[in-house]
Image (tube, rainbow, N blue to C red):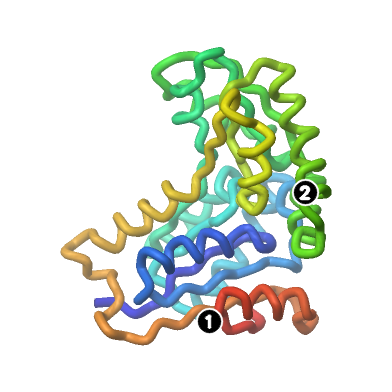
Amino acid sequence: MNNKPILFIDSGIGGLLYCADLIKRCPQEDVYCIADRENFPYGQREKNELARILILLTEKLIKNTDPKILVLACNTATVSALEPLRQNFPNLLFVGTVPAVKPAVNASKTGKTGVLGTTRTINDPYNRALVDECEKDCEIIGIAAPDLVEFVEQRYENAGKNEKTAIVKKYIDIFRAKGADTLVLGCTHFLYLLEEFQNEAGPAIKIFDSLDGVTKRIEHLLDENNGELRASPGSKPEYKLLLTGKEPADSIWENRAQDLGFELGLV
């Protein structure tokens, strides 16, 4: 049995949905969500710069929290830093958030798959490598949506239904016009707008995300070696939302933590 925490890292609130999904399926585990607000947004940073940022943050987290698994709950962080992190910290288990390109490509009937993500994710050759692993070839229509990341991080809680629908619709209209019949939400922030994406896409465009795949991968690691990484049965779990930076948490972060039943603190 192992009662060390499972850590989720994102530049903002994207990791919270992934934490919540794991807690629902593994409620006995200690789960900490790290919101790296000091370096938000990740999507505009150069690959090597982001890798350095995450290596330094991981060093600090290992000293302060001693995790058993670290989850990069961010597509941009995964394509930029997963391999450098594994090389620098070979004794720590990492889980990446990979855009769900392969299932989307394999499900496409038009041979055109849309990928919506940050600038860094869309420009990374990793997406093309995922297509090359698929059962069939497909045209990837990649669109960077930094405004959508900012919207979810800064405005989502206070935005009305019409505003949420409008910002999603403009992207769905682009993918529909280009003939895409599958769409990958390649940023964890976008899952907050999953309902709006599904409503605007209708039956013509199927939406894919990585939430279930990430949770299943964590469960697989917990179950290896007869479940030696599982928390002790009956142990009282800790759920924490930890922010980077020296500034105190404002009310929006307090509300986010309270809504999920997380203890709020600083890294």
Question: Residue 250 got which mark?
Answer: none
Residue kind at label 2, given as amino acid type: Lys
Question: In x, y percent, where is residue 63?
Answer: 51, 79
Question: In x, y percent, where is residue 9?
Answer: 57, 63
Q: Disc 2 to disc 1, how far (Cα)?
A: 38 Å
Please tell me which of labels 2 and 1 falls first in the chain. Answer: 1
Residue at the spot 50% in from the left edge and 45% down from the top edge? 210
In the rendered image, which residue does mark 2 sit on?
164
Q: Is residue 183 above or below residue 43?
A: above
Question: Residue 64 got which mark?
Answer: 1
Q: SS class of the residue under badge 1?
A: helix
For disc 2, the neighbor class at 10 Å (few under 14, some 14 to 19, many from 20) is: many
Which quarter of the rendering shows the N terminus? bottom left
**Residue 122 found in image quarter:** top right
Residue kind at label 1, given as amino acid type: Asn
Q: Are marks 2 and 1 in contact (CB under 8 Å)?
A: no
Residue toward you, 12 or 194: 194
Residue at the spot 55% in from the left edge and 67% down from the top edge? 58
Residue toward you, 38 or 227: 227
Q: Is residue 164 among the parts visible in the rendering?
A: yes
Q: SS class of the residue under badge 2?
A: helix
* Number of numbered labels in the structure image: 2
**Residue 267 found in image quarter:** bottom right
